[in-house]
Image (spheres, rainbow, N blue to C red):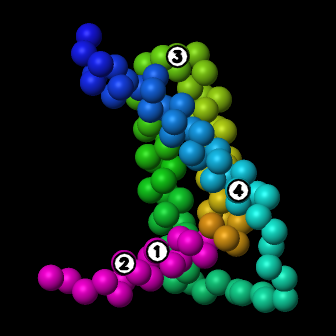
Amino acid sequence: MCLFWTFLNDMVWFPVFEIIFFGTFLYALLIPPRGGIQIIRGESSWLKLITTWSILSVILSGIVSSCYFLDGIKTFFVILNLAMLIYLVFFNAWFRNKIIGYWSWLEKRPEK
């Protein structure tokens, strides 16, 4: 088999993806919260967060489900990834602000 196709294998990219996702989760978990400011999200912001969670949960579940070498432990990885995603999207202020900022950037971007 060609080295190029070996590099594109699920056994290479799935661990890389999981390390990046888990690293993001750990960073968000360990980042010190900024005190003094309390933000109450409006309906529009919550809709963006729920939409983001919905899209990312389908993508994460699809990635795990498509990995052939995870037979027997796919459920574990789906639950783990969705639990980390729930924490990031709904309970971590840093990640929520990144999501809202990205949505705002998309909305303000001019069409060509």
Which secondary structure, mark 4? helix
The answer to whether 97 is drawn above or below residue 40 in the figure is above
Crowdedness near tag 2: few (<14), some (14–19) or many (≥20) residues, C-alpha within 10 Å: few
Per the rendered image, the range of residues in magenta is: 96-112
Asked whether 79 falls inside the magenta stretch, the response is: no
Main SS of the magenta part reads helix
Q: Residue at x 36, y 78 (%)?
A: 106
Q: What residue type is labelled 4?
A: Tyr
Query: Are dots 2 and 3 in contact, CB under 8 Å?
Result: no
Q: Can residue 100 be seen in this view?
A: yes
Q: Which one is earlier in the sequence, the residue at label 3 or at label 4?
A: 4
Q: Which amino acid does label 2 sit on?
A: Leu
Crowdedness near tag 1: few (<14), some (14–19) or many (≥20) residues, C-alpha within 10 Å: few
Q: How far apart are marks 1 and 2 (CA)?
A: 6 Å
Q: Which one is earlier in the sequence, the residue at label 4 or at label 1?
A: 4
Near-viewer residue (48 or 94):
94
Q: Distance between the residues labelled 4 and 1?
A: 19 Å
The answer to whether 29 is drawn above or below residue 2 in the figure is below
Crowdedness near tag 4: few (<14), some (14–19) or many (≥20) residues, C-alpha within 10 Å: few
Q: How far apart are marks 2 and 3 (CA)?
A: 38 Å
Q: Is residue 105 left or right of residue 27?
A: left
Q: Quadrant of the N terminus?
A: top left
Query: Are dots 3 and 4 in contact, CB under 8 Å?
Result: no
Q: Which residue is drawn at 60% across and 28% down?
A: 75
Q: Quadrant of the C terminus?
A: bottom left
Q: In this view, does 95 lie to the left or right of 69?
A: right
Which secondary structure, mark 2? helix
User: According to the image, label 1 marks what residue?
Assistant: 102
User: According to the image, label 3 marks what residue?
Assistant: 71
Q: How far apart are marks 2 and 4 (CA)?
A: 25 Å
